[in-house]
Image (cartoon, helix red, strand yellow):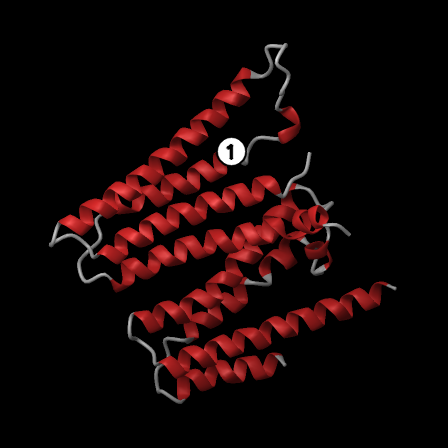
Amino acid sequence: MDLLELWAIFGPGVAGAVFGAGWWIWLDAVVCSTVTVPFLHYLPGIFASLAALMFNCVRKEDIDYSPYDEGEWRLKLWLFIAYVVSFVSLAGSAGLLIQDSLDKSAPSVWTGVAGVLQCVFVLICGLVYWTSHPE
Amino acid sequence: MFSASILLQILACAIYNNWWPMLSALMYVLVPMPCLFFGGGSTQFLMSRDGGGWIDAAKFLTGASAVGSIAIPIILKHAHMIETGAMLIELVSFFIFICTVLCFHQAGLDDDW
């Protein structure tokens, strides 16, 4: 069988593994942190997971790529909102990383780095799951 | 082989008199659950692409649970709650567990013919 077939078979499993890796990295940062991590730092990971769930709720057959017809604008609006949520979560985690590196009493830099890695892995998991479903 | 995996699990705890690595055994219970719930007790669906949404969700959960088995020893080591040797024994135990699952899967495939 060809590579696309293999990707369709193992893609969802790989997506789950990447998702688990992202959240376990964040758990490692929280456990090893010497100061209490405020709830604000949890939000980028939660929103990234939510965004990955949002754009995988769409069935790819329903997307209309025709430049002539009006198409299903609600579907594209939903995908756009999912993109905005993922972008905001990545930007938020990067902002928290910079803030943590400047402030001495904040959690350590590893917490910020783990937050960014968590968002990246969770969004990659969404993309892996999306691409493993051929049309 | 499964017994060897569990034996290494207990050894990792007993040698260092530290029972935190038993948390990793919880993930061993989680890993086969998607097979039982969505796949009808077989590992056939893992090699198939025609299952649909629920089968994909089962694959996703299997991958996430498997990563947990690797992540727990590493996080415990990073938090200095277990020794490096215990972490390595845990990872070897998980590797043997995976070999057990693959042998079970191969035996299941042979039964289909």
Residue projecting furthest to the right: B113
Mark 1 element type: helix
Disc 1 crowd rating (10 Å Cα; few below 14, some 14-19, many 20+) is many
Q: Does any portion of residue A122 appear in the rendered image?
A: yes
Which quadrant of the structure image shows residue B4?
A: bottom right
What residue sits right under mark 1 in the picture?
A55
Left or right of B8: which side holds A3? right
Task: Give the residue drawn at x 64%, y 74%.
Answer: B100
Q: Chain of mark 1?
A: A
Question: Residue A96, position in %: x, y?
Answer: 24, 44
Question: Residue A20, position in %: x, y?
Answer: 46, 55
Question: Residue B86, position in %: x, y?
Answer: 40, 81
Q: Amino acid at mark 1?
A: Phe
Above or below, B7 relative to A37: below
Quadrant of the image for the N terminus of chain B?
A: bottom right
Task: Give the residue drawn at x 30%, y 46%.
Answer: A42
Q: Nearer the viewer, residue B111 or B48?
A: B48
Task: Give the residue drawn at x 58%, y 17%.
Answer: A72
Above or below, A74 relative to A92: above
Q: Does any portion of residue A39 appear in the rendered image?
A: no
